[in-house]
Amino acid sequence: MEHLLVHLSYEARIAGPVQYRWMYPFERFLRHLKNNIKNKARVEGSICNAYLVEEASKFCSHYFEQHVQTKQKKVPRNDSSGGGESFEGDFSIFSHPGRASGCANVRYLDDREYMAVHNYVLLNCPEVAPYTE
């Protein structure tokens, strides 16, 4: 094995960085093409048809509506464009659309935080305004 280490510096100097002479990306792409084979009797035609279908679907996905999720055009992770759940009778202060990011954590408010939230709702919610006057 020591013999191999002697030649590594020479090979790097002559051939350049390993990513320019590495076959792994091409092998991965060939594996992707081979996974699309449906007709084992006509392999070349099957690969060509699968490639054309994939290219056409990628091209057409750019013209779908904004809310349609595809492999090429995914809806952003923290999308605030609405479409969230709405319940009748909710206060307007809590009706802002959006989704939470990350995993859900249970957190209990202490007395000081609870009073701050309570005062915020009483002062900023128009549905409560007739009762606070």
Image (spheres, rainbow, N blue to C red):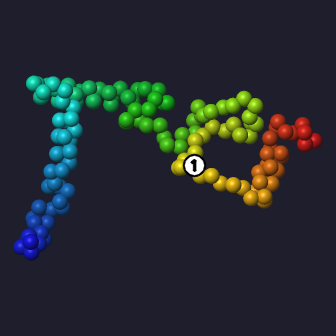
Q: Residue at x 41, y 35 (%)?
A: 73
Q: Quadrant of residue 16?
A: bottom left
Q: Position of residue 54 (x, y in %)?
A: 27, 30
Spot the residue most to the left.
3
Q: Quadrant of residue 121?
A: top right
Q: Position of residue 79 (x, y in %)?
A: 54, 40
Spot the residue most to the right.
133
Q: Nearer the viewer, residue 19 or 13?
A: 19
Residue 85 falls left or right of residue 103: right
Residue 78 falls left or right of residue 127: left
Q: Position of residue 47 (x, y in %)?
A: 17, 30
Residue 78 falls left or right of residue 7: right
Q: Quadrant of residue 96?
A: top right
Residue 120: tell me if it is visible: yes
Q: Is residue 105 above or below residue 32?
A: below
Residue 59 falls left or right of residue 125: left
- Would you name the residue on which mark 1 appears? 104
Q: Position of residue 120 (x, y in %)?
A: 79, 49
SS for tag 1? loop
Amino acid on which the number 1 mark rests in the picture: Ala
Q: Residue at x 69, y 37 (%)?
A: 95
Q: Residue at x 44, y 32 (%)?
A: 69
Q: Nearer the viewer, residue 12 or 45?
A: 45
Residue 10: tell me if it is visible: no
